[in-house]
Image (cartoon, rainbow, N blue to C red):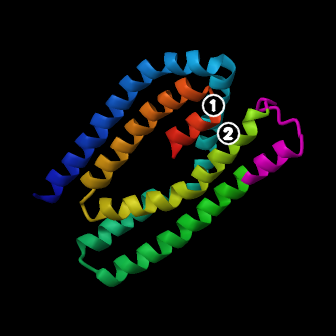
């Protein structure tokens, strides 16, 4: 299959799972609200929003790395590809560490009893922020590894795995919410 066909297949897979996740979310939100209650559901959504801010530590490095890897692969320059990959991993680790430190600072402030106006002062928030911290620290490295497949024009496989993992996380999160009524366990299922 040509590079354009592989890229189209990866985009189609991503789109399919994106729409499937949206449909599953519409069905799952009432389950979350019933199982967790409005307060803990709100805490979980707040923690997920916080995770979005921690991903800002990437500052576009993963997209830049993907473009550079694609260009070096197109030129068939293995040495430059390895060079870009090594530096991309170092930068991903650095941005992951930066996100982990920011999340750790928020977690430490919550543990110290600081009144952070942008976060609810609920004891469950500590566990939620801890889970988000781990996810924020590992996300840049996993994005860099995904970019290698994308640059090699083999993105349909990670897209398929990523889409299946997101759907599985959403469905298992709903099951955990219904079984345990614990927002932190639901968050661990959905972002893991």
Quarter of the image for residue 188 reads top right
Q: Residue sitting at 48 percent across and 29 percent down?
A: 175
Tags 1 and 2 touching, CB below 8 Å: yes
* Residue 128 spot, x, y in % from top left: 67, 39
Q: Residues within 10 Å of mark 2 (few under 14, many from 20)?
A: many
Precedes in sequence: disc 1 or disc 2: 2
Q: Residue sitting at 69 percent across and 20 percent down?
A: 39
Determine whether, in the image, residue 107 is placed left or right of residue 93: right
Q: Is residue 59 above or below residue 51?
A: below
Determine whether, in the image, residue 60 is placed left or right of residue 156: right
* Residue 138 spot, x, y in % from top left: 55, 57
Q: Residue sitting at 38 percent across and 36 percent down?
A: 167
Mark on residue 128? 2
Determine whether, in the image, residue 31 is placed left or right of residue 182: left
Q: Secondary structure at mark 1?
A: helix
Question: Any magenta on residue 41?
Answer: no
Q: Residues within 10 Å of mark 1 (few under 14, many from 20)?
A: many
Mark on residue 37? none
* Residue 86 spot, x, y in % from top left: 46, 76
Residue ID for mark 1: 183
Magenta-tinted stretch: 104-122
């Amino acid at each position: 299959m040509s590079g354009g066909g592989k890229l189209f297949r990866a985009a189609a897979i991503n789109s399919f799972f994106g729409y499937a996740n949206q449909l599953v979310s519409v069905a799952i939100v009432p389950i979350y609200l019933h199982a967790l209650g409005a307060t803990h559901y709100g805490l979980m959504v707040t923690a997920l929003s916080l995770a979005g801010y921690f991903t800002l530590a990437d500052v576009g490095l993963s997209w830049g790395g993907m473009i550079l890897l694609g260009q070096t692969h197109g030129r068939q320059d293995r040495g430059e590809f390895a060079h870009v990959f090594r530096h991309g991993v170092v930068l991903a680790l650095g941005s992951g560490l930066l996100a982990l430190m920011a999340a750790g600072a928020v977690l430490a402030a919550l543990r110290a009893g600081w009144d952070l106006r942008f976060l609810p002062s609920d004891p469950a928030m500590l566990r939620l922020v801890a889970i988000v911290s781990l996810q924020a620290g590992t996300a840049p490295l996993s994005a860099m590894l995904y970019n290698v497949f994308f640059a090699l024009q083999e993105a349909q496989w990670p897209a398929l795995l990523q889409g299946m993992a997101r759907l599985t996380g959403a469905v298992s999160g709903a099951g955990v919410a219904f079984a345990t009524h614990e927002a932190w366990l639901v968050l661990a299922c959905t972002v893991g």
